[in-house]
Image (cartoon, rainbow, N blue to C red):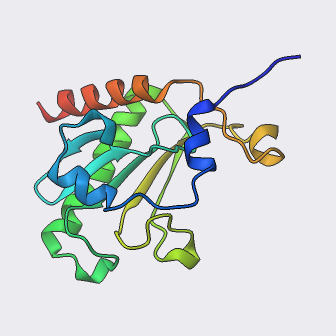
Amino acid sequence: MHRLFASWRMKYVSSNHKEPGCIFCDAATQPTNDERLVVFVGNNAVVMLNKYPYTSGHLMVAPKLHTNKLSALPQKTRTEIIDLISESISVLTSIYKPDGFNVGANLGEAAGAGIPEHLHFHIVPRWNGDTNFMTSIGDTRVLPEDLSQTYQKVKHAFQVIRG
């Protein structure tokens, strides 16, 4: 019998409380801390790995402005977010060569937003056949790569693409 351990998820699974503050605001103001998983900081938005990813390379792009409303963002911020989503897709394609992507935002708790108070977009690489019995039946994700390895690869690729 084989065993699959994902012990890093226990903290998330057993937690009934939210951490104080906002992870996106913290990422924007203190990006050098690798624990925040920030891979790029722009003028108006940040790109960071999802700490609890659906797949390897699962990124999030968030405005620096703390808001949950797309309409509250200045045009330059909306433009930068779309540009960063596009760059994220290019970076992830160069590293992982996925067959496709899910890109989107969950606006509000009812829509599934885990952090409904700060607007953010998800970029999730997908591969043909990547939904297996673990996800379908066990409600468990299997990630083939440690989060720290993903972080180093994606951060480096952003540095290369940004020159």
62 over 73 or under it: above or below: above
Between residue 87 and residue 119, name the one nearer to us. Answer: 119
Between residue 10 and residue 132, name the one nearer to us. Answer: 10
Q: Residue furthest bottom?
A: 71
Count the labels in the image: 0
In the displayed structure, does residue 44 sit left or right of residue 62? left
Query: Which residue is depicted at the point 56% across and 39% down?
Result: 55
In the displayed structure, does residue 7 sit left or right of residue 146? right
Instruction: Please state the horizontal and vertical placement of residue 117, each as a whole percent of the image.
Output: 37, 73
Query: Which residue is depicted at the point 24% across and 34% down?
Result: 158
Between residue 7 and residue 163, name the one nearer to us. Answer: 7
In the displayed structure, does residue 72 sit left or right of residue 133? left
Instruction: Please state the horizontal and vertical placement of residue 26, each as a whole percent of the image.
Output: 24, 54
Query: Which residue is depicted at the point 16% across and 76% down?
Result: 74
Identify the image quadrant of the C terminus: top left
Identify the image quadrant of the N terminus: top right
Q: Is residue 78 visible?
A: yes
In the displayed structure, does residue 91 sit left or right of residue 114? left
Residue 141, picture quadrant: top right
Instruction: Please state the horizontal and vertical placement of residue 66, each as a whole percent of the image.
Output: 24, 70
Instruction: Please state the horizontal and vertical placement of residue 103, each as a whole percent of the image.
Output: 46, 56
